Image (tube, rainbow, N blue to C red):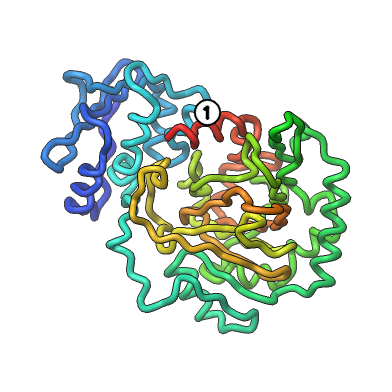
């Protein structure tokens, strides 16, 4: 018989009560796991769980393996759905995913995000730092906000050389080659929006990936973090496509563990080399300061929640750094688009225990970009 997972030490009843009050669905959620049922209900600001008994108004069928992945933070609700392992028997996807922040708190102690609990310690969420800033100061800002903006790390000549290499790789990319992501434009044509494993095909980009300046910024919080050029899509180059597109060029609010993998690679640190600079016109990075190590509901922005947001404008040669589970977005360009950013992510040693060469959590997303886009738009 499937057992209820133990509640982690330190779960705060007040935090749980606020999360329960934030539920937009009623009637509870039941998981049927290989014939056994596990039900979660909200009542008077409290969450009650039970094995067996009457099923809730929303019912999901899972295998024992899928249930283990959900409880163990290896796959999320959306990750299970995309993988074909989430069978919604009664209710809707929106009703299921509404419970996810509560489930993550009860299963793993990851609290639902609440801006009233954020403590910035007097720090400015929108400040940027010069490349010669003190490592301790940079680390303190990154640890507090979940992201960091460092100016003037690379020269214009270095960025020009990198862009020439990206032009070369882009000219050889083909849809379905497993080395690139694509979107569909309004006229029905395809457009390249991301190159993956880019450093494996370019000595110039490989040198950039391994540059000591990148290693310094990627390991500010943890010296054991390391790059993974041959897995997790390696060095990934974002290419912002202008206009209206279908797919994941314009990535809505998300955490990089949004489909799964939190237990194996968080907290990772993504270093974004700003090859062209960025602004609202080109489609820049937006972040929710202090949201790392927590969870927000899918579609929270459409519900009008009061959440602070910072837009990061950059110049060519700047670098952004973000902890991968900070809530962030790459919205549609308001103008010309064409922002280019090369991301070099630094992972904890545990990643290599789970992910082999050529494997990535994003494989599922890359092959279902339009489905993921539609799910984000529906909640």
Which residue is label 1 attached to? 82
State the image coordinates of residue 48 (x, y, percent, origin top left).
17, 35
Q: Could you say where residue 224 lies in the image, as x and y percent from the top left? A: 57, 64
Q: Which residue is outermost to the left? A: 44
**In-image side of 142 versus 314 (left or right):** left
Closer-to-camera residue (271/227): 271
Q: In this rendered view, identify the residue nearer to me: 163 or 110.
A: 163
Tag 1's secondary structure? helix
Residue 265: where, in percent of width, then height? 52, 50
**Which residue: 18% across, 47% down?**
17
In the depicted structure, whether residue 35 falls above or below residue 366: above
Q: Residue at (80%, 59%) from the top-left corner?
A: 205
Q: How many marks?
A: 1
Q: Quadrant of the N terminus?
A: top left
- Which residue is found at the position 20% from the left and 43% from the top? 21
- Residue 62 seen in this snapshot: yes
Q: Position of residue 124 (x, y in %)?
A: 44, 75
The answer to whether 109 appears left or right of 333 in the picture is left
Name above or below for residue 171 compared with residue 137. Answer: above
Relative to 35, say whether 376 is above or below. below
Nearer to me, 307 or 362? 307
User: Can residue 235 be seen at all in this image of the molecule?
Assistant: no
């Amino acid at each position: 018989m499937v057992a209820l997972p133990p509640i982690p030490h330190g779960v705060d009843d007040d935090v749980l009560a606020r999360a329960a009050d934030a539920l937009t669905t009623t009637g509870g959620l039941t998981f049927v796991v290989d014939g056994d049922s596990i039900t979660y209900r909200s009542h008077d600001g409290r969450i009650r769980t039970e094995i067996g008994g009457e099923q809730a108004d929303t019912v999901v069928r899972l295998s024992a393996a899928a249930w283990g992945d959900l409880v163990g933070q290896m796959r999320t609700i959306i990750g299970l759905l995309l993988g074909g392992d989430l069978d919604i028997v009664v209710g809707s996807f929106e009703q299921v995913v509404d419970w996810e922040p509560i489930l993550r708190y009860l299963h793993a102690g990851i609290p639902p995000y609440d801006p009233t609990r954020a403590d910035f310690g007097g720090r400015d969420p929108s400040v940027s730092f010069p490349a010669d800033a003190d490592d301790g100061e940079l680390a303190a800002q990154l640890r507090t906000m979940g992201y960091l903006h460092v100016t003037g790390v690379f020269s214009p000549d270095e960025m020009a050389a990198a862009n020439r290499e990206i032009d070369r790789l882009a000219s050889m990319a083909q849809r379905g080659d497993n080395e690139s992501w694509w979107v569909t434009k309004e006229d029905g044509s395809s457009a390249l929006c991301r190159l993956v494993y880019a450093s494996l095909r370019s000595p110039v980009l490989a040198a950039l990936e391994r540059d000591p300046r990148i290693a310094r910024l990627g390991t500010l919080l943890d010296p054991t973090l390391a790059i993974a050029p041959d897995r997790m899509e390696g060095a990934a180059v974002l290419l912002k496509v202008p206009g209206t597109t279908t797919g994941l060029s314009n990535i809505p609010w998300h955490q990089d563990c949004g489909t799964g993998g939190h237990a194996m690679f968080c907290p990772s640190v993504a270093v974004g080399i700003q090859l062209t600079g960025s602004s609202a016109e080109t489609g820049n990075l937006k972040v929710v300061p202090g949201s790392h190590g927590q969870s927000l509901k899918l579609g929270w922005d459409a519900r009008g929640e009061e959440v602070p947001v910072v837009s990061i404008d950059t110049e060519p040669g700047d670098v952004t750094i973000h902890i991968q589970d900070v809530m962030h977005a790459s919205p549609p360009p308001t103008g010309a688009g064409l922002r280019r950013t090369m991301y070099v992510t630094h992972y904890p040693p545990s990643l290599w225990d789970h992910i082999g060469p050529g494997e990535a959590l994003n494989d599922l997303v890359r092959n279902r970009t339009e489905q993921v886009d539609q799910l984000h738009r529906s909640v």
